[in-house]
Image (cartoon, rainbow, N blue to C red):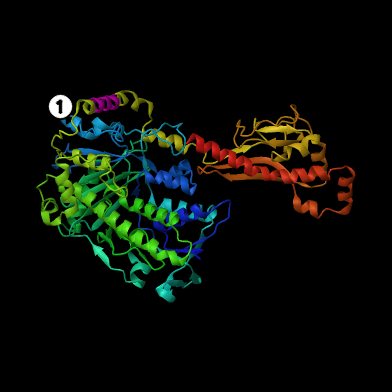
């Protein structure tokens, strides 16, 4: 039986994997498995500032993390696109977008042919999508009042990797029941069939498990050091293997925040520029075969000086990597996730999404028994080998289409020997047939046809007219879609805040919905007369509450989970309409049998909620009360009411279920 999952290594890879698996199998606090994460207390997180895909929105929701709290605690901003500058010719005005939202009407039609006939001069992204215009204006993809996770245009995030890991650590351990062990792994212990039985740590002894996930980064303690799985280098296709990273302040506190990751081409690589709330993460990735560290540093310094005038340089942090991936990712009872599985380069932010995909596949296809693991691992390896190769094709596409001739780096990237056959075949096809949503690409492709369209036609690629698809009806539908984009461009941006204004508003929001019923009246509270306790206890959770205006102790039925929200119908029995002091409550209070309580609730959408100001019967005090007190309660005939009050608290789960159903309906 597969019961104990051990994640070796922390960081984003470890904690996302642990969290997604734990969230998948955690049901009302119970789980058929245990998830343990073992990480060294001596190895710092590599992250320097990350960009995500829109998939991270769903990941946060599955983990139960509030989007608002995530933005507040991770220095995060909303990302809508990648903006490529100087990739085509190297000119100062050379740029295009790869937005997250597909072209208008993408599910039903292909806008490429109609756009190619347009003489207005609009780029493909600007003609086919509102999002490019929002990026130009540095606007948010949602209004301040838009609910968490919802959006007007698709969005991902820019985030501080170290803060994100800290948040994941706390959330997974406190909310999802992940066991956290800070210890250095000394040895890996094998058992029959070559499986890993346990890892021995220096500080915490042996950690046993049924399935082990290697999230130890480039060290690859399990997949490489133990299983010796070969690494397949792709440096002959993707030349970039070095990075210099820096953290740069904004020129002022109210400086605009970009809606896109900026990728600006250099002589032998490119500079990333990620706008967080309080700073920018800027770095230069380059090919060590085409330049050296000093030259790359000078280009990075020149870029920073151009975006933050007067800023003095700093010592850049160097990161080295070999672009490629493992020959296998799942061997025996060990799965490699994150950099231990592979890493290419940060272009198009594929690193985090590959972690999300791996963790989700693990959670969805977790074999219940070791006997089924080999079949699952075979399919897993086939799928992820396919995915890694397709990412390589997509990243290489950016370089192959460049027309730059100013350095050997750009010329070598267009050399036939460096272009995978799979990519060249696609390019040959796309000269006569534009990529579209026609099922040609595999559903397991990371990048949809829409992404290929944005890159191809953003970089000036041309597809010949296709007489099979150029019909009057198709042209009219496409023209209508382009007109819809133009209409949205006229009407939508003015209704959306700038990124900076959105972040300021979010920073002022409460991360936890808190209602103190002792100080605030709410329609979710229905007063209950003493004689009605037995009847209403069967349908509602009952509490005692000191009325915020009169100061009297009342018995109340809780019918909702937010201010002025009733999830359940009003009590069918005749409840007290006016505040009425509860004699039962007063009696229990006089005997010291009441205690304050707050409801701490985590809803399915990740929103934490706290309801304060309530009082309930203290079960321990009641059971240990002197016989004289118990006799007095019995003489007053309160035993039935007490049983009803205690049993009524089970109805809190009904309220939570109703609330989650309501959230699902809205979503």
Q: Nearer the viewer, residue 524 or 466?
A: 466
Residue 530 against residue 20 in the figure, above or below:
above
Residue 40 seen in render? no
Rendering quarter of residue 340? bottom left
| Position of residue 350 measured from the top left corner of the image (x, y, whole percent) | 31, 51
Question: Is residue 430 located in the magenta-colored stretch of the structure?
Answer: no
* Left or right: residue 308 compared with residue 547: left
Residue 606 against residue 469 in the figure, above or below:
below
Predominant SS of the magenta segment: helix
| Position of residue 447 measured from the top left corner of the image (x, y, whole percent) | 29, 46
Residue 471 seen in render? yes
* Left or right: residue 573 compared with residue 87: right
Q: Nearer the viewer, residue 21 or 141?
A: 21
Q: Residue furthest left?
A: 405
Residue wearing tag 1: 119
| Position of residue 399 measured from the top left corner of the image (x, y, whole percent) | 17, 48
Residue 574 against residue 375 in the figure, above or below:
above
The crowding category of the residue bearing disc 1, from other C-alpha atoms within 10 Å (few below 14, some 14 to 19, many at least 20), is: few
Q: Nearer the viewer, residue 181 or 468?
A: 468
At 40% across and 74% down in the image, what residue appears? 194
At 16% across and 44% down in the image, what residue appears? 429
User: Which element is circle 1 on?
Assistant: loop
Total labels: the figure holds 1
Residue 662 against residue 493 in the figure, above or below:
below
* Left or right: residue 644 compared with residue 62: right
Q: Which stretch did the figure color magenta? A: 476-486
């Amino acid at each position: 039986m597969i019961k104990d999952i051990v994640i070796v290594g922390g960081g984003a890879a470890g904690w996302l994997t642990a969290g997604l698996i734990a969230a998948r199998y955690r049901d009302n606090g119970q789980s058929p498995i245990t998830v343990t994460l073992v990480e060294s207390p001596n190895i710092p997180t590599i992250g320097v500032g990350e960009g995500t895909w829109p998939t991270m929105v769903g990941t946060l929701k599955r983990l139960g993390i509030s989007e608002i709290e995530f933005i507040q605690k991770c220095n995060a901003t909303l990302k809508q696109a990648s903006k490529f500058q100087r990739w085509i010719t190297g000119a100062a005005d050379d740029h295009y977008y790869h937005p997250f939202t597909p072209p208008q009407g993408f599910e039903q039609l292909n806008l490429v042919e109609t756009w190619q006939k347009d003489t207005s001069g609009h780029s493909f992204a600007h003609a086919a999508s509102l999002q490019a215009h929002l990026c130009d204006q540095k606007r948010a993809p949602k209004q301040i009042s838009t609910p968490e996770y919802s959006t007007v245009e698709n969005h991902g995030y820019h985030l501080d990797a170290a803060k994100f890991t800290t948040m994941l650590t706390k959330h997974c351990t406190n909310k999802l029941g992940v066991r956290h062990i800070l210890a250095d792994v000394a040895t890996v212990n094998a058992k029959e069939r070559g499986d890993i039985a346990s890892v021995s740590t220096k500080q915490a002894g042996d950690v046993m498990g049924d399935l082990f996930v290697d999230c130890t980064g480039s060290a690859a303690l399990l997949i490489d050091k133990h299983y010796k799985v070969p690494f397949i280098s792709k440096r002959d296709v993707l030349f970039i293997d070095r990075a210099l990273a820096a953290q740069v302040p904004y020129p002022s506190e109210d400086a605009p925040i970009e809606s896109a990751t900026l990728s600006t081409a250099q002589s032998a690589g490119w500079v990333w520029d990620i706008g967080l709330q309080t700073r920018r993460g800027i770095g230069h990735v380059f090919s060590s075969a085409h330049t050296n560290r000093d030259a790359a540093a000078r280009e990075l310094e020149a870029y920073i000086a151009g975006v933050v005038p007067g800023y003095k340089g700093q010592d850049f942090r160097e990161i080295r990597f070999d672009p490629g991936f493992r020959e296998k990712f799942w061997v025996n009872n060990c799965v490699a996730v994150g950099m231990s599985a592979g890493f290419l380069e940060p272009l198009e932010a594929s690193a985090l999404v590959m972690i999300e995909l791996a963790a989700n596949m693990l959670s969805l296809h977790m074999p219940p028994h070791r006997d089924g693991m080999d079949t699952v691992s075979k399919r897993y390896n086939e799928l992820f080998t396919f995915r890694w190769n397709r990412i390589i094709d997509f990243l290489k596409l950016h370089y192959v289409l460049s027309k730059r001739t100013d350095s050997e780096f750009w010329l070598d990237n267009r050399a036939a020997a460096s272009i995978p056959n799979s990519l060249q075949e696609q390019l040959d096809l796309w000269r006569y047939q534009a990529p579209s949503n026609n099922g040609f690409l595999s559903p397991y492709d990371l990048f949809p046809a829409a992404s290929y369209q944005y890159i191809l036609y953003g970089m000036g690629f041309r597809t010949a007219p296709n007489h099979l698809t150029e019909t009057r009806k198709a042209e009219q539908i496409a023209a209508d879609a382009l007109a819809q984009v133009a209409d949205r461009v006229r009407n939508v941006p003015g209704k959306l805040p700038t990124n900076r204004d959105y972040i300021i508003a979010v920073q002022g929001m409460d991360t936890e919905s808190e209602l103190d019923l002792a100080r605030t009246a709410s329609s979710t509270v229905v007063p209950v007369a003493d004689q009605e306790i037995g009847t209403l206890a069967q349908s509602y959770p009952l509490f005692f509450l000191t009325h915020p205006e009169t100061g009297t102790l009342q018995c109340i039925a809780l019918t909702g989970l937010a201010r002025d929200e009733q999830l359940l119908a009003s009590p069918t029995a005749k409840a007290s309409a006016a505040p009425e002091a509860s004699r039962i409550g007063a009696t229990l209070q006089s005997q010291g049998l009441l205690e304050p309580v707050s409801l701490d609730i985590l809803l399915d959408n990740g929103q934490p909620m706290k309801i304060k100001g309530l009082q309930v019967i203290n079960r321990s005090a009641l059971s240990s009360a002197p016989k004289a007190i118990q006799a007095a309660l019995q003489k007053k005939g309160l035993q039935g009411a007490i049983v009803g009050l205690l049993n009524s608290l089970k109805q809190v789960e009904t309220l939570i279920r109703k609330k989650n159903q309501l959230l699902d309906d809205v979503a």
